[in-house]
Amino acid sequence: MKKSEPANIVAVADVIPEKKVSKKKDLTVKKKMIARDVSWLSFNARVLQEAADLSVPLRERIRFLGIFSNNLDEFFRVRVATLKRMLSFGRSAKVHLEENPGQILDDIQQISIQQQREFDRIWKGIEEELRNEKIFIRTEKQLNRDQQKFVLNYFDEEVRTNIIPLMIESIQHFPYLRDKSIYLAVVLARQDNSVRQKFALIEIPTAILPRFIILPSKEGEHDIILLEDVIRFCLPHIFSYFGYDKFTAHIIKVTRDAELDIDNDISTSLIHQLEKGLKARRKGKPVRFVYDKDIDPLLLEYLMRRLGLSGKDNLIPGARIHNFKDFMEFPESVFSGRQQHHRKTFIHPLFMNAPSVMHVMQQQDVMLHFPYHSFDTIIDLLREAAIDPNVTSIKITAYRLARNSKIINALVNAVRNGKQVTVALELRARFNEADNLEWKTRLEDEGVKVLIGIPAMKVHAKLCVIKKRIGNKTVQCGFVSTGNLNEKTARVYGDHCLLTANRSIMADINRIFNYLEHPRHDQKFLEACTTLPVSPYNMRSFFLRMIDREIKNARHKKPAGMIIKMNSLSDPEMVARLYEAAREGVDIKMVIRGICCAYTENKKWKKDMTAVSIVDEYLEHARVFIFHNGGQEKVFIASCDWMLRNLDHRVEAAVPILDPSIKQELNDIMQIQLSGNVKARILDNEQKNEYKRDNSGKRIRSQIEIYRYLHEKKYE
């Protein structure tokens, strides 16, 4: 494989003028789209399907219940909170959303309750399977004498000092209930009814102590008790001095508005705004109240009144256990060899015995496919750059980093070795704001130049450029990725990363960094890009023109088609152009993991769109765009989905794949995913989430097939 210099990539589609979608037409398109939030709930239902799939190992099914729960928490904290805010705008919200936010909230409530029932049904079945495996989750009423003694000791040694019961009836201002926490709502009474019952709350300290405590068990068995049940068992000891001898306790949970109100007041630093917003987030308005359906009715009524909730709010009755996100960490040890054995990642063959990552990159482009290929190659690249005496500078973007980031360690060591290091750190990465503020401080303390973004625009592009000075010559290499520079998530997120020394690509990456360093110069640096389509400048118009080329070819009875892979498709203008392409007979195949607002079938189209969603062991996170382009195929990977925020309100980058062998590699991977018939669900107009099946008799689980394909692939 040899490096090839590109033609002017952006100019390829310029022969077709960009079409403008009027606001009136845009409104019409929105009415012909699936509601974004309903589509998202449909995606989370696919996660729930994995928990119900008996072919999935038991521990993995428990983990999928945790993922479902965690996803739903974030959905309520962000999307439902946004819809509730929209209600305050009245009629203007209806114009903005093209839907009645009140109606959407009603739909969400109905779907959520249905999904909660399905969740409870699945969990009940999993509990039975656990019992068959001699794994028992014991309640406070199911302990033998040895276990009772163990629990009392554990409570005294570990739990007692980490809880403070709140006698809520005697508190004038109802205590603030933390988001992400669960509480034991307790009714205190006497057996003889001689004293009026009282209510209390106890926060379960899962941020300090493990949720799962393994109990002394019989040989060949594993008994587990949840932390809240340890506290339930010890309620008589906690409240002994009040004279009560009868206790009932049920778990409740409040989900709060987690959106940060960040204005564009230039007199207030972004850092100050974020710190203020993070404090405000902790006290956001409740957007969901989840409770044990067996809770005392008087206690429920009291809590709703004190929390200011009504029947119109998202009140979700559930079973005994809540905050199932903790079940992602269900103890592995109890499975004693029956847990899932993940396929091992492996070093890309071209780097297997290479003494220098940069040397290979100077010879040819290489595509890494995570999590099949090891992320260690990226870390090795940065470590090599940190100690190479010829390297003068490193520039890189960072959105979500691992807790003990090896990426950061490499960059810090680069500074210590005299390199100039620039990090474009996105402080507003949702739910990572506090972590990134800490990273900013550490990086600046070490001498790294930290860029903190652009007002009202997140930096979501995944880019790196490394400069070397060899004699009188400057050479550059780097990468463009679809995923975060996070070695932890790279083990489970499916992403692509192009490692290259292509001069045109490197020139555009430098232009993007110039833009990030000088955002007040408008977009002149982005306008100068000749190879990389970039948001917010020309990403939208570029992909629209690529679709228009396919439409034009279809109208002239020429082969026309595209393969599109992304996380979410919700932008009305992009959907409208896809509808137009389908109407003209363009062959459109899509792999969309999450939100898909586009209908895929219409009697007026010459050719329906094909769309599938793959939910499996790895999270499909990559964005890939393949256009037939009159036989001169164009292939891109990108950091962005086709959503309004990505195309118009973020800094994003796509990169053309110029090496023919890598083009073929991506094509092969996409064909494997499109042919999958085990974990692929059909995205249809009714959001039924039916599994894709065929009559060939051959089962194709795409992630396993891709692993085999890459593991067996030979490189020259």
Image (tube, helix red, strand yellow):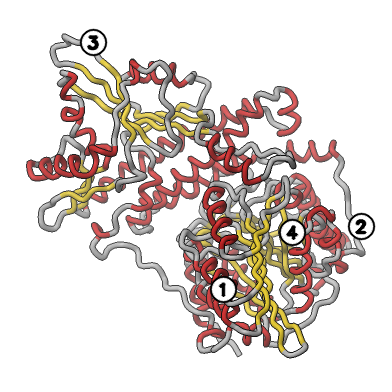
Is residue 617 or residue 408 the one in the foreground? 408
Disc 2 element: loop
Which residue appears at 67% of the width and 80% of the height? Answer: 365
Mark carried by residue 599? none
4 or 1: tag closer to the N-terminus:
1
3 or 1: tag closer to the N-terminus:
3
2 or 3: tag closer to the N-terminus:
2
Disc 1 element: helix
Which residue appears at 37% of the width and 47% of the height? Answer: 326
Q: CA distance from mark 4 to mark 3?
A: 65 Å
Label 1, on which residue? 416
Of discs 1 and 2, which sits in the foreground?
Answer: 1
The x, y position of residue 30, in whole percent, is 74, 39
Disc 3 element: loop
Q: Amino acid at mark 1?
A: Arg
Of discs 4 and 2, which sits in the foreground?
Answer: 4
Label 3, on which residue? 196
Classed neighbour count for the residue bearing mark 1: other residues with Cα under 10 Å, few (<14), some (14–19), many (≥20): some
Residue 405 in view, yes or no: yes
Of discs 4 and 3, which sits in the foreground?
Answer: 4
Q: Amino acid at mark 4?
A: Leu
The x, y position of residue 675, in whole percent, is 57, 65
4 or 3: tag closer to the N-terminus:
3
Q: Which quadrant does the C terminus fall into?
A: bottom right
Which residue appears at 40% of the width and 35% of the height? Answer: 117
Q: CA distance from mark 4 to mark 1?
A: 24 Å
Mark carried by residue 17? 2
Label 4, on which residue? 516
4 or 2: tag closer to the N-terminus:
2
* CB within 8 Å, label 4 to label 3: no
Which residue appears at 64% of the width and 48% of the height? Answer: 596
Q: Amino acid at mark 2?
A: Pro
